[in-house]
Image (cartoon, rainbow, N blue to C red):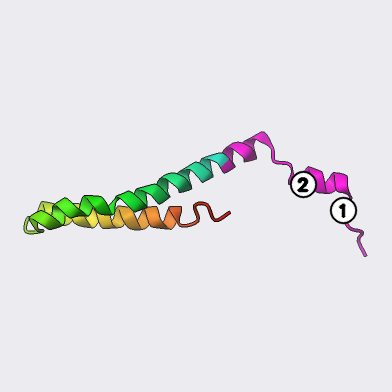
Amino acid sequence: MSSPPTNQLRTALNEATPVEHVSRSIVRRTRSLAFWTAVTLPFLYLPLLATGLEKSSHVTAFLALLVANAVALLIGHSHLRE
């Protein structure tokens, strides 16, 4: 049987290297940006919906906004859950 790790080993395993710290910070900021982008993107739908989706460029812009919103929701869904 193996013995449980000592406090020193446990501390060494829990300490993040500078690279891990920076990467966690980048991931956290990316999730935050994606979350708030997902929150604000629907406001851009309003002018398109108010004027109607009669032109193909309006339909394309609307679909692009929907895809961007879905991607932002996917990336930002775990913001502040950790």
Q: Is residue 39 left or right of residue 14?
A: left
How far across and how far down the image is residue 69, in percent? Answer: 32, 55
Check disc 1 and report its element: helix, strand or loop: loop
Q: Is residue 82 left or right of residue 46?
A: right
Q: Provide the major secondary structure of the magenta segment.
A: helix
Disc 2 crowd rating (10 Å Cα; few below 14, some 14-19, many 20+) is few
Disc 1 crowd rating (10 Å Cα; few below 14, some 14-19, many 20+) is few
Furthest residue to the top? 18
Quadrant where the image shows the N terminus: bottom right
Residue 69 belongs to magenta span: no
Q: Does residue 69 sit above or below 25 in this rendering?
A: below
Q: Is residue 51 left or right of residue 69?
A: left
Residue 16 belongs to magenta span: yes
Badge 1 or badge 2: first in the primary sequence:
1
Residue found at x 49% / y 52%: 79
How far across and how far down the image is residue 15, in percent? Answer: 74, 42
Residue found at x 58% / y 54%: 82
Three-letter amino acid code at the position of disc 2: Leu
Give the residues drawn in magenta, as a range: 1-24
Three-letter amino acid code at the position of disc 1: Pro
Residue found at x 54% / y 56%: 81
What mark, if any, has residue 13 been given in the picture? 2
Furthest residue to the bottom? 1
Residue 56 occupies quadrant: bottom left
How far across and how far down the image is residue 62, in percent? Answer: 20, 55
Residue found at x 56% / y 40%: 25
Residue for badge 1:
5
Q: Are marks 1 and 2 in contact (CB under 8 Å)?
A: yes
